[in-house]
Image (cartoon, coloured by chain):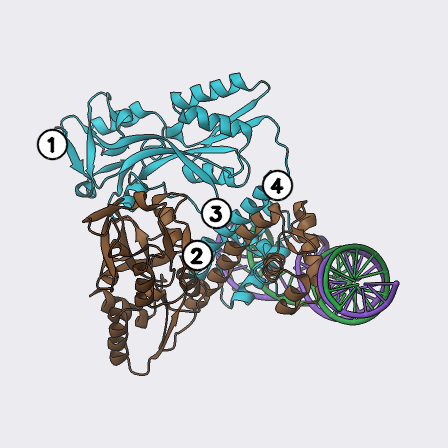
Chain colours: A brown, B cyan, C purple, D green
Amino acid sequence: MLMHMDPHLLRTFVAVIEHGSFSAAAQGLGYTQSAVSQHIAALEADLGTRLVERRPVGPTAAGERLVEHARPLLLRLDAARADIARLRQVRPARLAVACAPITLTPALTMALARVRAATPGLTLAVEVRGRDEAVRAVLTGAADVALVDGVAAPSDPLPLPDAGPMSTLAVAEAPLAILLPADHPLARRPSLRLGDLADAHWVDAPDTAVPLGQLRSAVRSDGFTPHMTYDGTDVRGLGALVASGHGLAALPLPAATGLAGTAAVRIRAPRLVHRTEVVHPRTPTSAVRALVSELNG
Amino acid sequence: MLMHMDPHLLRTFVAVIEHGSFSAAAQGLGYTQSAVSQHIAALEADLGTRLVERRPVGPTAAGERLVEHARPLLLRLDAARADIARLRQVRPARLAVACAPITLTPALTMALARVRAATPGLTLAVEVRGRDEAVRAVLTGAADVALVDGVAAPSDPLPLPDAGPMSTLAVAEAPLAILLPADHPLARRPSLRLGDLADAHWVDAPDTAVPLGQLRSAVRSDGFTPHMTYDGTDVRGLGALVASGHGLAALPLPAATGLAGTAAVRIRAPRLVHRTEVVHPRTPTSAVRALVSELNG
DNA sequence: ATCTTTCATTAGCGATGCTGATGCACATGG
DNA sequence: CCATGTGCATCAGCATCGCTAATGAAAGAT
């Protein structure tokens, strides 16, 4: 029973952690509960440590470490498979776009319309996903292009999960702004320093604004703790929350302007921009190339 | 014979590509030639493509892709194992340092001396490696700390191979400078733009100066092609080559000053610095913590 | 206290991956 | 042109592995 960190073992390990149960993981994977139990036992024997706490089921300290490695590993495995599958595949006229919520702009929809007009018989598919999930979709071949957004220094690429070679290209850049209530003491300022706002009240709206996690890593601060969470995708909803004082939010300047009861103030320091990038495999299909040039040109 | 991209298969695949021979790879891995042949056949069957060209043995297009994925994958596997091994290991008083050539400075050696003085019975080991190799050593547990250097924007971390969570900390930063012959037309300038020098003649001295590859990715240019290569680790040797017109080199400003027959001119744009960072696991040993605080404080 | 749920253990069987022997293709030297 | 050598492919055979099914044990729930 000594299989040297087989991906299968890692996969069931992750499934166990996710399901919080051996038997549920077994069902999800199409195995027997016994098999799952043996998988975990094999991993634990191989690594010489307990990885899973039982009853209730959960990761031990070592287990948490292993999950952090196992997820990217499994992703990379799928990415490798997809990367090679792309090579030998004469692609049908399909264009599957995975985009982060904010990136679904008129610019994108119109570019898609032009691509469709220029490509008879094209099957279009647009799916809105989280940023990392969109990149994962491209890596595993589930999508042909991803559009992701985020904050970064003007000359830096967005930090993306590194699971293999990909091409990225910026298609839109806007100054980063803070959305705050119109009567907020800072609302009349011409610009703000992001670092001064780390301890403010924030609304975490990952699908509508810049997720607080990105601000945290951009400023390398421990602040930006969510005072409330907004799960919607509507900017006006977020605007209303901000207007009534539930907290601040960071958005690209154009998206932050003109919302009732709010003011949008640019970030002066650190030098950050909100950028949208297209992400696609290094061997893009013709449809992807068409979309990229439509977006870019 | 359908093992779903088993790491063993990937490992022998990489070995085959490296050795350029099935039988040599088999010998290196302690397998039979037959086993290696079956491994490759299994991979090719699984991925549905030929991966290895035979006679002579070499990667196909798909094979090259696979190598690009397989190497980081195998590294990550080792990193995961090492990461967990560290947790359950009461460490001996050992301090293994892997450092890039440039980073072996008086500051480092003196810090090591202070750590040794403060830690009776400490076993010290210093190994000079390439930058990536030094990081790999830390990831796989072969070393406890790495010191690596490189160029980056002032607020950016150095781009390092992403094979798991690590802690990095800057310990030295210096302006980036170009080393050129004293009689060079640009030698009297107060500062230079790096982009203007992409097409100059360059000496690639990866162990003594900034590797040209790093300049290329920092400026995102295709230039900086090596006009000659210098494999030594002595700055004066590099200085002599530059002085007699073999090409330019990029170095941290302090290292570039005072070399006979040369001039050192700062880089003005893009905003880049030469930085040395310590890299260590997120759970550092006490010796590592001591070294870091000596270097930092 | 009994029942239920959930993970661990064991036996047994089919599948897998290894070795060793042999086959086949290509290159080289007489 | 054939003989020989080198190196990968293939095959048979065997030991091992990983799965399922059945059963055991232990922690909650009722």
Q: Chain of mark 3?
A: B
Q: Residues within 10 Å of mark 1 (few under 14, many from 20)?
A: few
Ranked by sequence position, the earlier of labels 4 and 3 is: 4
Query: Which circle marks residue B27 in the picture?
Result: none
Q: Earlier in the sequence, mark 1 or mark 4?
A: 4
Mark positioned earlier in the residue sequence (4 or 2)? 2
Between the residue at mark 3 and the residue at mark 2, the CA separation in whole angstroms equals: 20 Å
Q: Which residue is mark 2?
A: B64
Name the residue tied to disc 4. B85
Residue on which the image places disc 3: B163
Instruction: Choose mark 4 or mark 2, whichever is in front.
Output: 4
Looking at the picture, does residue B234 appear above or below residue A117?
above
Q: Amino acid at mark 1?
A: Pro
Q: Position of residue A160 (x, y in %)?
A: 39, 54
Distance (Cα) linking label 4 and label 3: 16 Å
Q: Say yes or no: labels 1 and 4 on the same chain.
A: yes
Task: Pick the residue in front: B182 or A296.
Answer: A296
Q: Mark 2 or mark 1: name the one nearer the start of the chain.
A: 2
Image coords of residue A275 (percent x, y): 28, 57
Q: On the rendered image, what quadrant is the N terminus of chain A found in?
A: bottom right
Relative placement, left or right, of A213 versus B200 is right
**Relative height, residue B264 to residue A179 (above, below):** above
Residue located beneath label 1 in the image: B185
Tell me the amino acid under the disc marked 4.
Ala
Within 10 Å of the Cα at label 3, are there few (<14), some (14-19), or many (20+) other Cα atoms?
A: many
Q: Are marks 4 and 2 on the same chain?
A: yes
Classed neighbour count for the residue bearing mark 2: other residues with Cα under 10 Å, few (<14), some (14–19), many (≥20):
some
